Amino acid sequence: MRLTAEPVRIAEHVWTFSGHGGSAFSPSDRSVIFRQAAKQITELWWLDRNGRRLGSLSDPGEYVHMTLSPDDRRVAIERLDTNGNGVIWVHEIDRSATARFSFDPSWNWSPIWSPDGSRIAFAAAPDGKQASISNRRAEPPNRKRSSPETCSVFRTTFRRTASG
């Protein structure tokens, strides 16, 4: 990706994390998805690169982190459950289908796609204290779930860069 013009503000009140300076948005070549900071119950919106609203991704909820898959066909979403724990969900854009991805009772957060879109890495704290990174295959909603693989160090191969 290369800048070709002056920056244009396309969204305001994007949710940010004061602890580490992160923000809740994910861009692609064609659009941007983001979480607004103004409400607890929020909607995920599709915007084009000029800031025009293209539609909503799903029902209103308490969304935290989200990231588009490398092929822009799926979104991995962290949504708070009724107990206030983060749960990872995967939304298939073409089918408008959303399926739960993480199932353990602890907080699961910050999903990131592998560069080829076959896996999702996410942070988890199974014992409520020690955080670790889990990753597993990103299967379609109707397939049997694979068990997560846990590692203590996040591998940079899951980092998506502008070059892919």
Image (spheres, helix red, strand yellow):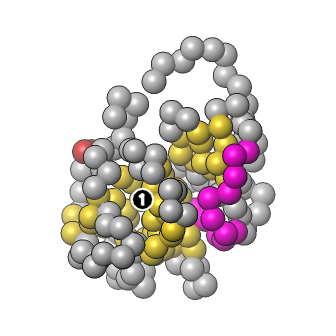
Residue 83 percent across, percent down from the top left: 58, 85
What's the residue at 36%, 41% (across, down)?
A: 160
Splitting the image into 4 quarters, where does residue 71 fall? top left
Residue 59 inside the magenta-drawn segment: yes
The amino acid type of the residue labelled 1 equals Pro
Residue that mark 1 sits on: 111
Q: Is residue 36 magenta?
A: no
Which region shows up in magenta?
Answer: 53-64
Specify whether residue 161 is in view.
Answer: yes
* Residue 1, image quadrant: top left
Relative image position of residue 30 (x, y in whole percent): 55, 35
Vertically, is 23 above or below 77?
above
Quarter of the image for the C terminus: give it.
top left
Residue at 73 percent of width and 45 percent of height? 53
From the viewer's side, name the closer residue of 23 and 116.
116
Q: Is residue 128 left or right of residue 31?
A: left
64 or 139, nearer to the observer? 139
Q: Residue at x 57, y 74 (%)?
A: 80
User: Could you tell me residue 60's position as x and y percent?
Assistant: 70, 69
Q: Position of residue 108 (x, y in %)?
A: 43, 71
Viewer-proximal residue, 85 or 90? Answer: 90
- Secondary structure, mark 1, is strand
